[in-house]
Amino acid sequence: MPSSLPPSRRALLAGAALSLAPALARAQGGTSGTTPQPAPGAAEARSLIAAPLKARIKPEPAPETPVWAFDGTGDGPAAPLVLRVKLGEALRLRLENKTGRPLSLHWHGVRNRNAMDGVGGVTQSPVAPGASFLYEFTPPDAGTFLIRPLVVGGSSEPAGRGLAGLLVVEEAKPPVVDRDVPLILQDWRLEADGTPAAFGQVAFASSSGRLGNALTVNGKPVPELIEAAPGTRLRLRLANACNARATRIRFDGLKAWVAAVDGQPTDTFEPLRATLPFQPGTRYDILLDMPGASEPAGAVVALIGFGMPLARLVAKGDAVAARPPVAPIGENKLLPPEIKLQNAFRRDIAIAGGAVFDKAKPEAAPTFTGDPTRIWTLNGAAGRAENPPLFSVKRNTAVVLALTNTTAFPQSLHLHGHVFRLLHPLDDGWEPYWLDTFQLLEGRTARIAFLADNPGRWLIGATALERFDTGLWGWFEVT
């Protein structure tokens, strides 16, 4: 049964092979070197080119940075891609790879057709340099979803060079707001000359991941400036597209209401202590009204160091008429009202690996020994397409996973093709929102429940991409 405590009183506990196995792809309706053919009368596919260019990541006089970006993405050469479609509208997008590495695009949070999930090396062949691939699907849910490069063994570099995006699927009856503003956070690790630090470093992959020394929002140095008339109602779509940086975000001088978590609507609630956990892959839809002209500017702040503003909201112009009270944006009726835990299939999954700390020398740096391509494991196995599944269930089976983090580091995890509830410790209820991404602290166990209603071979794995590249993922099957 759902939690008896109202959302406004609960903290989000979500905070507490470059080669494809062709037979696997064919077995799940995927493709191996081919792309789906358009249906008669279908709209022409939009071409999306991923290519190198230069952009200003650090303020002048720092040199520009060589990045990879999608063409025609908006304001600034490094601005992440923002795609907008209406609920029920088909998306047809031909990715053209003009970078020097294989690519694929994962539609993070979309309960997609399995062949379109975009995991290079599992659900499709990676798109080789100079090649293309057609993504064609109709998102079943409205919401805010990430677009991330996700090639087995090769995800960190495309993301670390800047490839990211947001897919906005607009509701049939969206909430009335004056402005809809995406805020996409990226984290860059740059050398003094502005070039990205070397990729594939074991020290990063085996510990906290590729934490950067420069932050951007929407492809520009932070903070993003938002100017609007006092009282203007905004919908902020916050998305963490960082390689590894997990943080918390705080709303200073703003009365913020959470309207959706990980793309799925929830009863609106104010964040506890005006803060929210914000790990890679997480998204929030926030409704708020601009401060009054006599009030200080508001800010969205990442709790890094003494606090780093990601966006500043400044009142400008004449006040607008008062807006009606903030209300929920509407439930997703495609999701089950409850999950019958008493009959659920249950599986334990243990996360292991990573660097090791010497308890006798707490001041010493952590160390790692072993195969640098298999640093992390789920149930003793590093992620490989040829591995047996973590489990296999029939469609419409309720599933409960008990995930235990035996490593020395927090782990951010993402469930593909589905959304889940975060269970209370005694299975006596769940948190009042749907998730596809959450953080599991070191030494802890968490249980998630979902209805396995989407056929195919799906991943559960790290959203810190260096960890994903070095084994922290596995797959399960829905038949």
Image: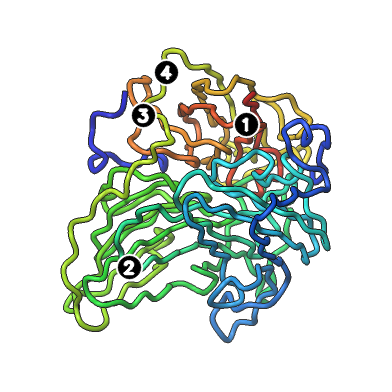
The answer to whether the residue labelled 1 contacts the one labelled 3, judged by CB atoms less than 8 Å apart, is no
Q: Which of the labelled discs sits on residue 213, or is there none? A: none
What residue type is disc 1 on? Ala
Name the residue at 78% across, 38% down: 371
Residue 209 visible somewhere in the drawing: yes
What is the spatial separation of the Cα atoms under label 2 and label 3, in whole angstroms? 36 Å
* Foreground tag (3 vs 4): 3
| Picture layout, residue 469 above or below residue 58 | above
Of badges 2 and 4, nearer the viewer stands 4
Secondary element under disc 4, as helix, strand or loop, is helix
Q: Give the class, few, some or many, for how many residues have Cα within 10 Å of label 3's Cα (few <14, many ≥20).
A: few
Q: Which residue is the extreme one toward the top?
A: 343
List the residue tagged with mark 2.
Answer: 299
- Residue under numbered circle 3: 337
Give the numbered dot on residue 352.
Answer: 1
Residue at 20 percent of width and 75 percent of height: 320
Asked whether the beta carbons under mark 1 and mark 2 sit within 8 Å of each other, the answer is no
Quadrant position of residue 354: top right
